[in-house]
Amino acid sequence: MNNISIKEKKVAENILKYLCVGSKIEGQMFYGIRILLSPTKRNKKRIKGQISLCIENDYVILDQVPEKPLTKKDYIQYRYSIENQKKIASLALRTIDEIYLSDDNRDLYMVMDNKQVLIVNGYHDEYECWQLEVTNHKDYKEGWGVVAMPKGEISYWAPEDMMQ
């Protein structure tokens, strides 16, 4: 399951941090789950579109970062729960303090200013699990995105200066 190199993980996390740290959760769309993020002081001159996280796999919202990685069983207990839906709605206007990928299977950790953490399962045998991207970007030369691909792969794209 650990299919990406340390360098690739670092590049993906740098893109995630640039797009997300300091952003506020502006809103959500519920055909699937898409969380809309605000621009930040650091990226607002460069990002000319909507930053969003599309969740297409199991997720959980906890009051703090867990001490050990979540298992498939951990995610299943929250699957389709009304409580989890309420928690995701309660993230409105929270600021993202930290974002990173797990070491073992591409889970996405998004830590809020109140220490709550949104964790999205990043592993599936056949499907993409989540995508964080800029949609409707006005500068067609600057595409931005990080995607949890099938079988634990990560794909990302960004302007050349972000690929270091």
Image (cartoon, rainbow, N blue to C red):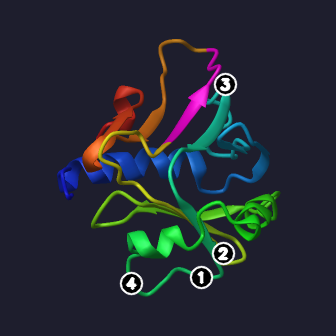
For residue 159, what is the image quadrant?
top left
Whichever of labels 3 and 2 marks the residue nearer the N terminus, that label is 3
Confirm or deny contact between disc 3 and disc 1 (CB under 8 A): no
Residue range highlighted in magenta: 131-138
Foreground pick, 159 / 137: 137
What secondary structure is marked by label 1? Answer: loop
Foreground pick, 3 / 127: 127
What secondary structure is marked by label 2? Answer: loop
From this view, report whether residue 95 is shown above or below residue 47.
Answer: below
Q: Which residue is mark 1?
A: 64
Amino acid, disc 3: Lys
Q: Which residue is mark 2?
A: 116
Query: Residue at coordinates 29% horizontally, 67% vertically from top-left?
Result: 103
Image position, residue 73 (x, y; %): 43, 74
Whichever of labels 2 and 1 marks the residue nearer the N terminus, that label is 1
Q: Quadrant of the N terminus?
A: bottom left
Q: Which residue is mark 3?
A: 48
Image position, residue 35 (x, y; %): 69, 46
Amino acid, disc 2: Gln
Q: Which residue is mark 4?
A: 68
For residue 6, what is the image quadrant?
bottom left
Amino acid, disc 4: Lys
Confirm or deny contact between disc 2 and disc 1 (CB under 8 A): yes
Amino acid, disc 1: Gln
The majority secondary structure of the magenta stretch comes to strand
Decide if residue 43 is in sight here.
Answer: no
| Left or right, residue 159 beside residue 47 | left
